[in-house]
C-alpha cells in the first residue's frame, strides 16, 4: 500500500512511471458509475459568449455535495472521477462530476489551469442551491483549479477543497512534462488536447489553425498556440506566471488538502517543494509513496479512520475539516 512519508523522501522514477501507467490501465477498464442525471449550466464568456458546461449529478439526498474536477485530458467519465462519486455516495454525499470547458468533446470552448470562473458559477447555481455544504476535489490540473478558486472569493457554503497530484508551478511542470522521459505521456495527452481544440475550431474561428496545433511537440508550445491567444496571455510563460497557484497559497480561504505522489513523473516533487517549505495554516500536505501521477495502490490512505483507498480518505478529510478552524477571514 502507499504509505505516508515526508517531503524529504527520495523519488523513485521507475516506481513513479509504473504506478502512473498502472493507474492509466486501471482507468481503461469499464467502470460503473453511481446513478446520475445530466447536469448543464450556461456561463457567459466575454469572447465566446454563452458557453455550456456539462456533467453528471448524483443526488444522495443529503445536504452535502462534492464537485469533482478531472485532469488535463480527462472528463466526467474518468475512472478516478467515478471512484470519487462512489466514495461520496458511501459517505452520504451527493456529487457532481463536472466537465471543464470542451472536455465533453462538445467543442464549446477551451479551458486552462486558472479558469476558475466556471467553478464559481457552478457552486452558486440554482440546481445546487439546496446543498448546505460544498466540497471540491480535483485531480492534476483540476486540483490546481480547485486550489486557485479557494484563494479567491468563494461561496459561503464551500467547506474545503482537495487536490491530488496537482501542480503549483505551471512553468516548472511544463518543463518537466516536456522532458524526453515523458514522451509517451506527452504524445497521448497532446493528441487528445489537439482533438478538443479541433472541435472548438469547427464551431468558431480561433487564432491558430488546428493543423498547426496538431504539430505541437511540447506542452509549452501547445499552450502558446492555444491557451495564450484564446485567453489574452502574451505567451505560454505569461499564462504560467499569472495563473500558477503556488505563489497564492497564503490566500487560501478554506481548508485545503494537497496529496503529493513523491515519485510522480508529471508533477515532480522538486516543482512543489519551493511552495511547501512553510505551507500556510490552511493547507495540509500528504506525501505518499509508492504512487505515480493520479495512480496509487488501491489501499492508499491518509491515516484517517473510515474507508480505505485514496478517494474515500480524501472525502473523509474534506468532510472532517468542517470542524477545523475556518479560514474565511480574508473575505
Image (cartoon, grey):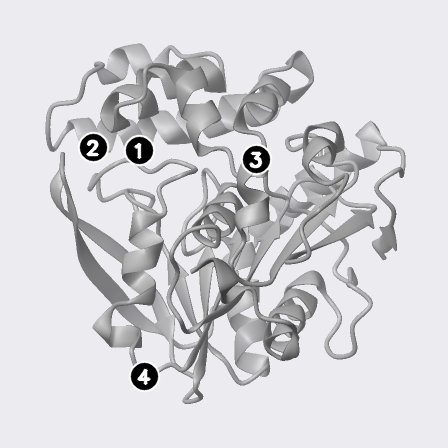
Q: Is residue 54 above or below residue 88?
A: above
Distance from disc 4 to disc 3, alpha carbons, whole Å, reads 34 Å
In the rendered image, the residue lying farthest to the bottom is: 61
Q: CA distance from mark 3 to mark 2?
A: 32 Å
Question: Which mark is first along the chain, 2 or 4?
Answer: 4
Q: Is residue 269 left or right of residue 93?
A: right
Q: Quadrant of the N terminus?
A: bottom right
Q: How many marks?
A: 4
Determine if residue 40 is in view: yes
Callout 4 crowding tier (Cα within 10 Å): few <14, some 14–19, many ≥20? few
Determine whether label 4 and label 2 are within 8 Å by CB.
no
* Label of residue 247 in the image: 3
As rendered, which of 328 and 71 lies closer to the eye?
A: 328
Give the residue at mark 2: 200
Q: Which residue does the numbered mark 4 point to in the structure image?
A: 130
Q: Quadrant of the C terminus?
A: bottom left
Q: Measured along the vertical axis of the image, is residue 90 above or below residue 229?
A: below
CA–CA distance in space, label 4 to label 2: 34 Å
Q: Position of residue 279 (x, y in %)?
A: 71, 47
Report the disc number at residue 196.
1
Amino acid at each position: 500500500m502507499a504509505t505516508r512519508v515526508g517531503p524529504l523522501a527520495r523519488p523513485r522514477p521507475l516506481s513513479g512511471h509504473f504506478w502512473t501507467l498502472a493507474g492509466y490501465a486501471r482507468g481503461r477498464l469499464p467502470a460503473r458509475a453511481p446513478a446520475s442525471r445530466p447536469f448543464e449550466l450556461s456561463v457567459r464568456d466575454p469572447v465566446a459568449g454563452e458557453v455550456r458546461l456539462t456533467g453528471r449529478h448524483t443526488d444522495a439526498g443529503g445536504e452535502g455535495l462534492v464537485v469533482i474536477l478531472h485532469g488535463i485530458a480527462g472528463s466526467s467519465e474518468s475512472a478516478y472521477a467515478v471512484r470519487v462519486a462512489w466514495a461520496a455516495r458511501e459517505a452520504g454525499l451527493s456529487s457532481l462530476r463536472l466537465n471543464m470547458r470542451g472536455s465533453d468533446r462538445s467543442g464549446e470552448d477551451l479551458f486552462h489551469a486558472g479558469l476558475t470562473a466556471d467553478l464559481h458559477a457552478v457552486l452558486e447555481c440554482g440546481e445546487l442551491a439546496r446543498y448546505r455544504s460544498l466540497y471540491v476535489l480535483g485531480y492534476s490540473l483540476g486540483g490546481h483549479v480547485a486550489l486557485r478558486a479557494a484563494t479567491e472569493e468563494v461561496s459561503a457554503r464551500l467547506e474545503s477543497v482537495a487536490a491530488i497530484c496537482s501542480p503549483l508551478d505551471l512553468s516548472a511542470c511544463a518543463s518537466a512534462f516536456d522532458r524526453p522521459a515523458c514522451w509517451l505521456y506527452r504524445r497521448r495527452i497532446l493528441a487528445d488536447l489537439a482533438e478538443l481544440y479541433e472541435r472548438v475550431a469547427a464551431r468558431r474561428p480561433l487564432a491558430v489553425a488546428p493543423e498547426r496545433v496538431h504539430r505541437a511537440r511540447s506542452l509549452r508550445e501547445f499552450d502558446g498556440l492555444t491557451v495564450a491567444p484564446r485567453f489574452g496571455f502574451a505567451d505560454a510563460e505569461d499564462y504560467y506566471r499569472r495563473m500558477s497557484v503556488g505563489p497564492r497559497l497564503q490566500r487560501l480561504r478554506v481548508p485545503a488538502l494537497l496529496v503529493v505522489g513523491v515519485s510522480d513523473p508529471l508533477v515532480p516533487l522538486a516543482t512543489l517543494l519551493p511552495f511547501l517549505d512553510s505551507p500556510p495554516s490552511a493547507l495540509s500536505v500528504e506525501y505518499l509513496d509508492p504512487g505515480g501521477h493520479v495512480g496509487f495502490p488501491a489501499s492508499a490512505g491518509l491515516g484517517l479512520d473510515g474507508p480505505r483507498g485514496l478517494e474515500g480518505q480524501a472525502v473523509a478529510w474534506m468532510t472532517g475539516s468542517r470542524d477545523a478552524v475556518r479560514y474565511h477571514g480574508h473575505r
